[in-house]
Image: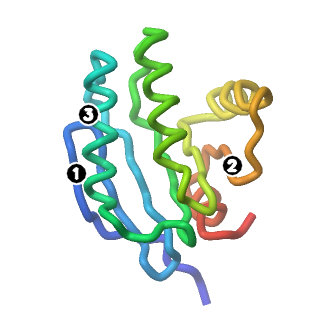
Amino acid sequence: MSTSWETEVIGETPHWKVSRNAALRVIFLERLRERLTGVAEVDQSFDAVRRIFGMAPLNAWGIVFDMRQAIPSGDAAIEDAFRRNRQHLIKPFAKMAILLAGAVGVLQVQRMMKDAPDPRIGVFSDEESAMKWAAGGG
């Protein structure tokens, strides 16, 4: 029997599409191509995602951060705000997978994570592997 990695959309903002697979207890957070132009906009975009999550207990869930469409800002303040918000957002989740477009991005993120490793976080370029990790496998 094969596992279904399909998700249902539960909310969308200009910067994110939020889906879930309730059977696997995985949230799929897809970063859309709309550019984030400032720190306040980053904070607001993450606040909107938190409102979509609501008050649901997420400590038994995994999350996939799909960053394949994201456009890098090149602005240190925006990148720092994104990192801060992501760290706050993932606190309740049991596992997190970061999904990137290719092997080079995976290596870059893995290298950046060496300073503060977190065994809950995996970095992938393959969607099925990311979903499997977030669902508790891998």
Residue depicted at x 42% and y 78%:
22
For residue 90, side relative to residue 7 (left or right) = right
Q: Quadrant of the C terminus?
A: bottom right
Q: Position of residue 86 (x, y in %)?
A: 49, 39
Q: Position of residue 36 (x, y in %)?
A: 30, 23
Residue designated by label 1: 12
Which element carries disc 2, helix, strand or loop? strand
User: Which residue ends up furthest to the bottom in the rendered image?
Assistant: 1
Residue 104 circle label: none
Which one is closest to the eye, mark 3 or mark 1? Answer: 3
Q: Position of residue 129 (x, y in %)?
A: 64, 59
Quick one: label 2 or label 3, which is nearer the N terminus? 3
Q: Residues within 10 Å of mark 2 (few under 14, many from 20)?
A: many
Residue depicted at x 53% and y 68%:
61
Residue type, numbered disc 2: Gly
Q: Are marks 1 and 2 in contact (CB under 8 Å)?
A: no
